Image (cartoon, coloured by chain):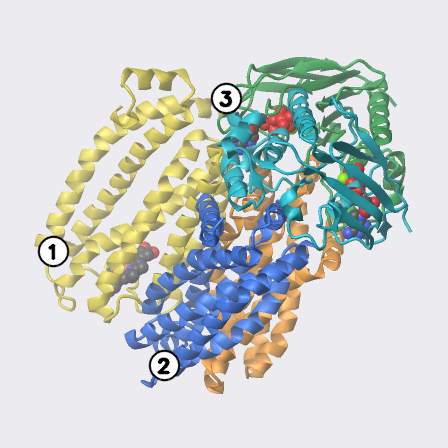
Chain colours: A yellow, B orange, C blue, D green, E cyan
Amino acid sequence: MFDFLNKYASLMHFYRLSRRLSQWLAPLTAVLMCAGVVGGLWFAPTDYQQGDSFRIIYIHVPSAWMSLFVYMSMAGAAVSILVWRVKVAEIALRCSAPLGASFTFLALVTGSIWGKPMWGTWWVWDARLTSELILLFLYLGIMALQNAIEDRRVAARAAAVLTLIGVVNIPIIHYSVEWWSTLHQGPTVSKFDRPSIHLHMLIPLLLMSVGFTTFYISALMVRMRTEILRYDRKTNWVREIVTTHHGSPSSV
Amino acid sequence: MSPQALVCAVLRREFRRTARNQSEAGHPLIFFVLAVMLFPFALGPDTALLSVVAPGVIWVAALLAASFSVEGLFRSDFADGSLELMALSGAPLALVGLAKALAHWLVAGVPVLLLTLPLAVGLGLDPGVLAILMASLALGSGCMSLLGTSISALTVGLRGSGMLVALLILPLYIPLLIFGASATANAALGLSAAAELYFLAGLLVLALTLTPWATATALRIRLS
Amino acid sequence: MSPQALVCAVLRREFRRTARNQSEAGHPLIFFVLAVMLFPFALGPDTALLSVVAPGVIWVAALLAASFSVEGLFRSDFADGSLELMALSGAPLALVGLAKALAHWLVAGVPVLLLTLPLAVGLGLDPGVLAILMASLALGSGCMSLLGTSISALTVGLRGSGMLVALLILPLYIPLLIFGASATANAALGLSAAAELYFLAGLLVLALTLTPWATATALRIRLS
Amino acid sequence: MTYPSTRLDVSNLILERGEFVLSPALTFTAQGPSLIQLGGENGAGKTTALRALAGLVTPASGSIHWCRQSIDKLDNYATSLNYIGHVSGLSAELSVRENLEFIAAIGRQQQVRSPAAALALLEAQTFAEQPVRQLSAGQRQRAALARLALFDCPLWMLDEPFTALDADSRKLVENLIDDHLERGGIALIATHQPWGGRHQATQIHLGRQST
Amino acid sequence: MTYPSTRLDVSNLILERGEFVLSPALTFTAQGPSLIQLGGENGAGKTTALRALAGLVTPASGSIHWCRQSIDKLDNYATSLNYIGHVSGLSAELSVRENLEFIAAIGRQQQVRSPAAALALLEAQTFAEQPVRQLSAGQRQRAALARLALFDCPLWMLDEPFTALDADSRKLVENLIDDHLERGGIALIATHQPWGGRHQATQIHLGRQST
Ligand code: HEM
Ligand SMILES: Nc1ncnc2c1ncn2[C@@H]1O[C@H](COP(=O)(O)OP(=O)(O)OP(=O)(O)O)[C@@H](O)[C@H]1O
Ligand SMILES: Nc1ncnc2c1ncn2[C@@H]1O[C@H](COP(=O)(O)OP(=O)(O)OP(=O)(O)O)[C@@H](O)[C@H]1O
Ligand SMILES: [Mg+2]
Ligand SMILES: [Mg+2]
């Protein structure tokens, strides 16, 4: 059973699959993002309280959601690494961490840009804000641990353990606004039964969110393909690719 | 050999080593005391201000002390080959990890609790707040030892493990700090701190069940 | 070999080692940042309170970071025999000590200064106070590196040197803390902080002239 | 007691450490009693090979079988093995006796002697109560080797066992190894010094190649 | 170049380390060229004696004179001496070459070779750019011994110089010592392995006694 799983998760198969996947996802991402930006900047009505400054929501909220989503997918990868030793998951974990860190950073930056007009300051030590900052540190920690261990497979397993230990923080970030009454917005969008947001504001937001997700997946695929070549650099199929394409792995 | 005997063997060894090398074991305690005692110098003699910040200062000092006392938990075992030997001995590493965490708590956690009493009184803390502070620290320090053991195992033998431990551990400790601080803040306002303490207790139970496996896995990874 | 060449050789070696093992060099910095950042979690989001305690917190964190980054200054040199070698080489140890302190300041002191800026802004510190804080820290961190080098030399290779360093060094650092804190407190009240800064500058000159000899003597004692 | 049937099969083992690659691939079979001396110039990969055979380093490719089972799948491989490497596995703060008692307490291997008796066999009683940190280089090595006398393991792997030993202790260790072979055991030793025991040693020479 | 007149006088040297007392007291005179091999069982005090002669340990009593002057009063004793102990004196993070360059830069001894040439003499070029932390035991020892080729010191003290060396490197080091003797130097070596160089070695046997 595991042999079967491992064959399907074999790096060569995944390498080919990923190329097809990103061929589809990259244009889809472009379409979604364009639609989201246009919808968000032109069609969404001006907020009666915040004026136009609220429009940063179309970057802020998707990236904040992605910062949590990427972590959860890394946790999934971590389980497959530790239980089944799936190589693809090792690579996915390694390549996801910088992406997750970037989303987190983006959420922090857009959040504080938004905070300046809203709260009159760039930064407050509010529960959600600080826990998002912790998430950034978690990502950085995972990256630092991976860099500190020379052997990539060993590094991946160590990072998997750390990722799982850190999972406790995710619910804390998510529920922090409910547990502590804070400055930060409570759930406005995610209350799906009765969203407290105008539909014309909501639709671009959803488009952007899906677009961010597909962007994450296609960026991940690109990163993973380079990493796969490094992993399997001593096997014949990689040698073939590299020799037929004269070096530059990203061109394959 | 029975699990109890294994845990006892590890504990006995740790206690002996601590007793032989008291000054190393004393380092985090001295650090804790000095870190707290520096604040009156830094903030000036404003008693009201001091007693407001006191629980926070004590919690932060305890966290920092724990974060760098766990760092060395496996260092000499790794350097002198004892860790390799334990792994090769066939003993269950999860149990070794649990015993190590227990030893750390007894050697570094409990003394911090005991030292908190005079320090908090010295900073002018109210007895009611003090009780909650002690309770939250007691639960929190257990979690710190358990989590810290896992992180220490994960980084043992790496170059610059000190920084890695700090970087990896503090995000994990911050939830403890938030709940601990909010428990004492509630107590200072005369509110109930039960919810926060329950939460800390829950985290402790979670850590007790999960971290030994994480430690064992981490040790196996580091030795391979 | 000329004194400059010797200092350069030591500096070059230290920089290389730092570059090779960035994470070890990063430890005190990460510690400093995290120690400061823990306070908002511990004290809650009360902006007014935070900006009052901010200079004190930053000074204490800088002291603690310095006190445990100096600890390792000679550790690996001692363990791998390089220190013995330097002593046997006939090079003037006072110069070696001065170069080591300079290297420590450049590698651990200056980055702390640079990190202070964003941290202080994040804690809501007033620009006027910030300038005085930076000035006092700049003078203070030089003293910390010089004094720390001597203490580190005195304790190198002793078991539990970590605790000894903390215990010996922090009392020496407290005068720096008092003047630094009172400089920023004056600034916060809109008063002049010149007297305190002159005093810190005086201490720095004193440390520059005296500590290299103390370091050399300490090293000779530890090696015999 | 004797070991009924012991067999170590190593085939096509390739090891990598950074740029270093052990080559040619290591292949051999050892059936107890047998003594294998790993030779090769400095940096040839003897230490790396021993660590891989002990299961401490994951090989890049190849297989290691103990009694016809892959060591990855064996749960009790660790209990059949006595590996003594460069580092002593002794804690510097504890006395030699305390260290050995701890090793005896946690070891899952079959214990055949008390720690005191094992130390006596290595003539280490004189410094048994000293903390390991105070020992001379040879004393420390003897304390580490006392593990051989403590447990009953069919497979021994010793990395430079004669380092810093004086002539008498060296003879002692050679006798220990000879006795082990007489019980049908397998011993792998990596050393640059000629083997002087009663039994014949099979030489395996490791070549070195950097890629 | 040769060393004009070198002479080491040790008289009634008594050393103590905790409970351990070196006895009987050590007395000898060495006049270059001369090779002295310190012998004695493990824990006899060879390492302690060498460290005392290098001025790193203060003796309980007795005197050490270099060229008829007490070493306590000599300022330039350190520059006449090349001591290589158990620990390598190499910083683990730096490459072998960088380590040797630092040693050359701070050393007050007379330098006779560039670091690269010294490494070549020890056949250590192959791993000269590797960080010391990655070296095998023998490679590390060779890197430490390269100091002998770097400086021109009339007095050498080597503690277990042959540890972990393969046969070729060992020959190399023996030749280095022989050349040193031919220049009129003095070499003190503490080792349990028989000396195989061209020159005759004077044996000094340390007895051991614990009080
Ligand atoms: C540095 C500052 C900020 C940070 C770190 C931050 C962080 C986050 C995070 C992590 C989420 C996702 C929460 C979840 O799904 O569980 C989020 C969502 C959100 N943020 Fe922010 N935020 C910041 C500033 C702001 C500001 C100033 C506003 C506007 C007043 C804002 C409005 C929102 C909204 C409306 C959501 C969506 C809530 C939902 O429906 O789940 N944020 N933010
Ligand atoms: N982390 C590493 N990165 C790169 N190379 C390494 C690493 N660790 C070891 N090596 C190299 O691996 C080779 C084999 O080392 P090993 O310790 O196995 O040699 P050895 O045969 O035991 O040598 P010796 O006789 O000196 O003990 C050496 O050339 C060493 O430089
Ligand atoms: N700090 C100490 N306290 C007490 N005894 C010590 C201390 N350090 C060393 N000794 C003892 O001093 C003696 C001499 O040690 P030394 O290292 O000089 O021996 P050696 O002759 O070099 O032995 P070897 O052949 O094993 O290298 C040993 O018996 C050792 O146990
Ligand atoms: Mg070796
Ligand atoms: Mg010795």
> Image height check: is C76 above or below C203?
above
Give the left or right position of residue D95, taking residue B30 as reference.
right
Q: Mark 1 points at which residue?
A: A44
Does the CB distance between marks 2 and 1 fall below 8 Å? no
Q: Report the amino acid beneath label 2.
A: Ala
Rendered image quadrant of residue C45: bottom left
Q: Position of residue A157 (x, y in %)?
A: 50, 38
Q: Counting other residues with Cα less than 10 Å from the Cα at mark 3, is it few (<14), some (14-19), or many (20 or more)?
A: few
- Mark 3 beta carbon near ligand 2 (under 8 Å): yes
How far apart, in angstroms, are the residues tagged by discs 2 and 1?
A: 56 Å
Q: In the figure, D119 relative to C24: above or below?
A: above
Select label 2 or label 1 by which is in front.
2
Label 2, on which residue? C194
In the visual, does C220 lie left or right of A182? Answer: right
Element carrying mark 2: helix
Residue marked by disc 3: D210
Which residue occupies the foreground of this view, D25 or A240? D25
The N terminus of chain B - image quarter: top right
